[in-house]
Amino acid sequence: MKIKPALLILALLVAFVVSCSRKEEHFTVDIIHNKGPQWGYEPKIELEFVQKIGALEATEENYIMWNIWDVVRDSDGNIYILDSGDSRIQKFDPQGEYLTTIGGPGEGPGEFKNPVSLNLDRDGRMYIGDFGKNHYIILDNKGKELRRFRHEHFIHKSRILPGKKLIYGGLYNQGVGMLSRYEELAKTGYYNLFHIIDEEGKNVHSFGEMDIYKEENMDAIFTNANAPFDVDRNGNIYIAYRYRNLIEKRDSGGNILLVFDRPLNFKETGYLFDFTFETYSNSISTHVAVDTKDRVWIITVIEQPDEWREQLKLSILMSVKKSAAVFEIYNSEGILLGSLPLPEDIFLFRIFDDRLLIVDPDRVSVSEYKIIEK
């Protein structure tokens, strides 16, 4: 009986049960306040559908996905789909034809247990964040395990940085009895949003202020690590906070370079997510990716429909409906260029070369679109 995704979702839900009040950082750079799009209201980019891999109605085993959590594309156009439910990576050629399976469920070399993050380096090595065992696993371009290490936080989303380093945003949940240790742990950087580590798992630098919820009656704390991010080809890090109208550009060492925002169609609110699931904030940003021209694509919510809010009470996995959000596109200096409609509902998206890859909300298929410059 397949229950691993259910356990993963439960663990994620517990980890994100938080209450976050907005805290203003003291930035050493000016905040760029975008007032409108530089392109005007006619997009200078369009998306052309290429193909879809996998489907709910798929019958061939290699096209039946069960809980996709990430997708990457290599320099030859091959697509690697991280199927967390089956603890495997499915590799397809540029035309979507199945090539091979990498990994599988288990605890031996080259095996996974609920992998949730996948990256490729220039040599084709695969970097897998495995939530189930809290391991980071590095495979060569044939799928042979090179090394693995364990880190103190649950490894969630990750990206490769220059100098064979990695950045990841962890998942955090500290329960009963942790209030007394909070100050002590905070001094060590334990509660930072992001951690930069080397290939052996050694922590190089931690940064980013995490919002903390203290539940006095339970003598417990819960922490929030929900800040979508991506890395450009030069190693600069872009962070788009989900519950703050705030976007940061940092260098590969985590030092802040730029801060920018944009006008919203709704009021930004403080965040309160309690155990009754009755209160929550307005979501602003859900996902971010950087293209090869160093343009920053951010899924930005444009409305807060009541039915969507009801869904948010029950799910923090944050699929977004195409009617409720747009791609906002910024240049590397934080200037809003323009926006583009979402072509479909999205669980997550990534950009490689001139291709945009979308994981659908059911996490059973990947759509490929070509980015066309007008």
Image: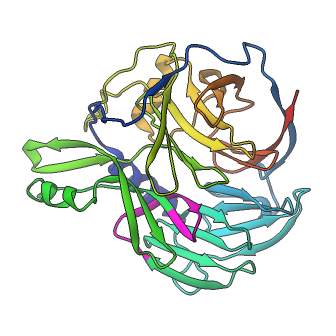
Res. 109 image quadrant: bottom right
Residue at the image point whose x is 55% and y is 84% from the top: 147
Instruction: Give yes or no for residue 155 being in the magenta stretch.
Output: yes
- Residue extent of the magenta highlight: 150-166
Q: Residue at x 36, y 53 (%)?
A: 207
What secondary structure characterizes most of the magenta part?
strand
Q: Nearer the viewer, residue 117 or 53?
A: 117
> Residue 286 at x, y = what percent?
53, 36
Asked if the magenta segment contains residue 227, the reply would be no
| Model colouring | rainbow
Residue found at the far right of this picture? 95
Residue 8 falls in image quadrant:
bottom left
Count of marks overlaid on the render: 0
- Is 165 rendered above or below residue 63? below
- In the image, residue 299 lies at what x, y percent? 60, 32
Residue 296 seen by the camera? yes
Residue shown at 72%/25% (left/top)?
340
Q: Which residue is more in the foreground, 41 or 51?
A: 41
Measured from the top left, where is residue 148 in percent x and y? 51, 80
**Front-most of residues 313 and 273:** 273
Q: Toward which corner of the image does residue 47 lie, by quadrant?
A: top right
Residue drawn at (63%, 43%) of the image: 289
92 displayed left or right of 136: right
| Residue 114 visible at all | no
Which quadrant, please, contains the C terminus? Answer: top right
